[in-house]
Amino acid sequence: MSWSLPVFRVAGIQLRIHITFLLLIAWLAFGYYAQGGSAVAASRVIFVLLLFLCVVLHEFGHAFAAKAFGINTPDITLLPIGGVARLERMPEEPVQELIIAVAGPLVNVVIALGLFVVGGAQGLLNRSTVEGGGLIAQLLTINIMLVLFNLLPAFPMDGGRVLRALLATRMSYARATQVAATVGQGFAFVFGFIGLLWNPFLIFIALFVYIGASQEAALAQMKDVSRRFPVSSLQEAVDALLATSQHDFPVVDETGNVTGLLTRNDLIAALRKNDPSLRVGDVMRRDIPTVTTGTRFEDAFRIMQECNCPAVPVLDSMKRLVGLLTPENVTELMMIQSAMPRRRVA
């Protein structure tokens, strides 16, 4: 992730701190100093750092659970809104996704139990405790709140991924993702409505949830189409185009290797020729570069610009197709990043 600084590496996972997180700490330190002097500023900044340590441990929980299934995590980035663990690829088995999704909140449960043993339950879930209680009581309450919030079935949060994993045991992965995304978008509207009446920060959370749910649903739809349609004829390509809102499709051979990219414009141009002998291999673009899940975003974006490609296939470390980077992805990411520095998750 751009504008992030590497801190240290644990078990092959690079921890990075986004520059906006450092700006947040500096801004909080200045504000607390202006309110109560250096002692107050130091105590509150220490609390915020310990809070984000809990967030980082939460993300390492996801990463270590994924590693147990052979899925590496190149890095974890600490942002003002929390942590982001970038998995090399998403698990394909519902049970694996369920375990990976639950692993993060379980870390917070363990932390909360440890704090409970040390400091007891005094002030538990008491608002006054969060605002002015002891450090242990505050961290205990915050960790419980993090567990409850993360387990809301609002995709793409952990609870939404748990919901998708459970649904995927009874329906297709794409359908399960669509249902979970719809539930997540419903929560986003609720967050937004409450934010208008009570806390404007919930509007930002609503935006994050809505965009994340939509993006996950689109990616799952693309993967489902690529699996259900082993496209070889133009008619099959038309079926794939009509089955989804996607415009461009990566073409893979029998071994799963990406061999090209079929765009909607190329498909329509081929259909106008009215030649039944034409195959997808005759009209697809073969000079499309690929990127891996470990490629930095700015490098992938530069590759897309240099080749003037409508989309770039994304591969994991085993050279398997895991996604497609499109200009729409870039636009959505820019929208999220433009909003990130303004708010944070407490």
Image (cartoon, rainbow, N blue to C red):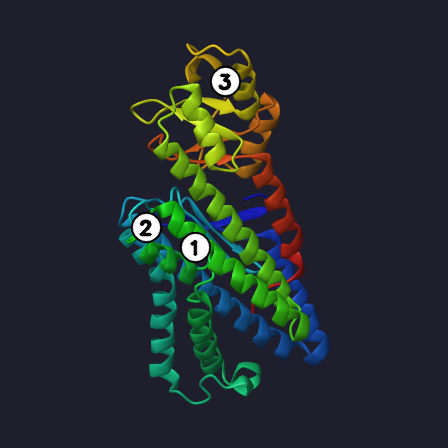
Q: Is residue 160 left or right of residue 274?
A: left
Q: Secondary structure at mark 1?
A: helix
Say few, some or many: other residues with alpha carbon within 10 Å of mark 3 (under 14 / 14 to 19 / 20 or more).
some
Along the line of sight, which residue is nearer the eye, 205 or 169? 169
Against 83, residue 252 (above or below) is above
Q: Is residue 134 left or right of residue 66?
A: right
**Residue 291 visible in the current orientation:** no
Q: Position of residue 145 (x, y in %)?
A: 46, 74
Badge 3 or badge 2: first in the primary sequence = 2
Against 195, residue 57 (above or below) is above
The residue under label 3 is 285
Q: Secondary structure at mark 3?
A: loop
Q: Is residue 4 left or right of residue 174?
A: right
Q: Which mark is residue 179?
A: 1
The residue under label 2 is 171
The answer to whether the residue labelled 1 contacts the one labelled 2, judged by CB atoms less than 8 Å apart, is: yes
